Image (cartoon, grey):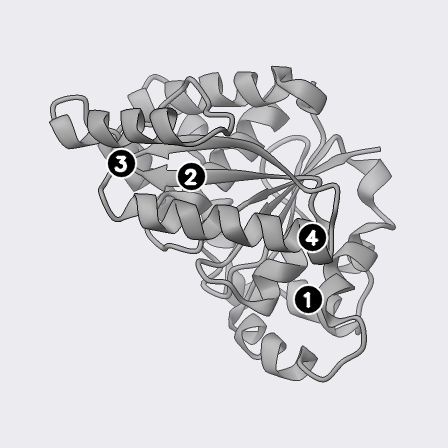
Amino acid sequence: MGKIIAVSNQKGGVGKSTTAINISDCMAAKGKKILVVDMDPQGNTTSGLGIRKNEVDYSVYDLLSGEKGAKEVILPTDFDDLYVIPATEDLAGAEIELMDEENRETRLKEALSSVKKSYDKIIIDCPPSLSLLTINSLTAADSVIIPIQCEYYALEGLSQMLGTVDLIRERLNEKLKVEGIVFTMFDARTNLSQEVVQTVKDNLDVKIFKTVIPRNVRLAEAPSYGLPANRYDRSSAGAIAYRRLTSEILKSGKGK
């Protein structure tokens, strides 16, 4: 049975979608069959995988509303072994519509149960907030990867995120684990980046991936072409870092 990994941080701009896109693509390049679920109404992961949102017939919104089953909303990408359940602007209204619905926190978990065995990994890109969409994502997941930007305020966001994981584990998904923390937008030239990394290592008893993701122009350019970094510029520092991170994820614990 496939493992479901959420990529989540309640703070925006930390490289969450970039991480979801690139670890998914790197896993697929290693021959793993991967499904990406875009739970962010902005749909950056959808477009970053080359899917044109205005041409999508069905999306994760239709899945959560119960209008369509998982197999009906899954789209192939241009890359072997990589599939996506896309997000469109409709998803922004899903929270309001689901608010009074029964089992509203478990809609995604129930919907993915029919396809979980068909994939080696299912990667969920969560929205940058503690919303019903995020709660659905973490309730469906076996584990969560938390990207954090190497800046001071990221530490506050990390504390909030770990608190959310504890809350979800206590009330909705007792099996949820922290797969690991990954540092993004790392700039080795600045003391701040190094201080943030060291502070987290010194104060938190949680797995931290050895690979750090550097600030990288090619990594930032890739989504505008609808390509993961590995397909856009395989030799770039960002692409190399995500290949290393992916190897770590696949080797760690149940991620094997």
**Residue 70 percent across, percent down from the top left:** 79, 56
Distance, label 4 to label 2, CA atoms, is: 22 Å
Regarding residue 50, the answer to whether it shows in the image is no
**Residue 150 percent across, percent down from the top left:** 26, 36
> Between residues 37 and 235, which one lies in front from this camera angle?
37
Q: Which mark is residue 147?
A: 2
In the rendered structure, which disc, 4 or 3, sits on the residue that comes first in sequence? Answer: 3
What amino acid is found at the position of numbered circle 1 in the picture? Tyr
Distance, label 4 to label 3, CA atoms, is: 29 Å
- Which residue is labeled 1 in the image? 58
Labels 3 & 2 near each other (Cβ < 8 A): no
Which residue is situated farthest in the front direction here?
203
Q: Which mark is residue 12?
A: none
> Between residues 105 and 222, which one lies in front from this camera angle?
105
What amino acid is found at the position of numbered circle 3 in the picture? Cys
Label 2: state its secondary structure: strand
Left or right? Give the position of 71 relative to 131.
right
Q: Depth-wise, is mark 4 or mark 2 nearer the camera?
A: 4
> Between residues 157 and 116, which one lies in front from this camera angle?
157
Q: Which mark is residue 150?
A: 3
Q: Image point 18% across, 22% down: which residue?
A: 188
Left or right? Give the position of 86 relative to 153.
right
Distance, label 3 to label 2, CA atoms, is: 10 Å
In the rendered view of the protein, which quadrant contains the N terminus? Answer: top right
Q: Does residue 241 lie above or below 196 as drawn?
A: above
Label 4: state its secondary structure: helix
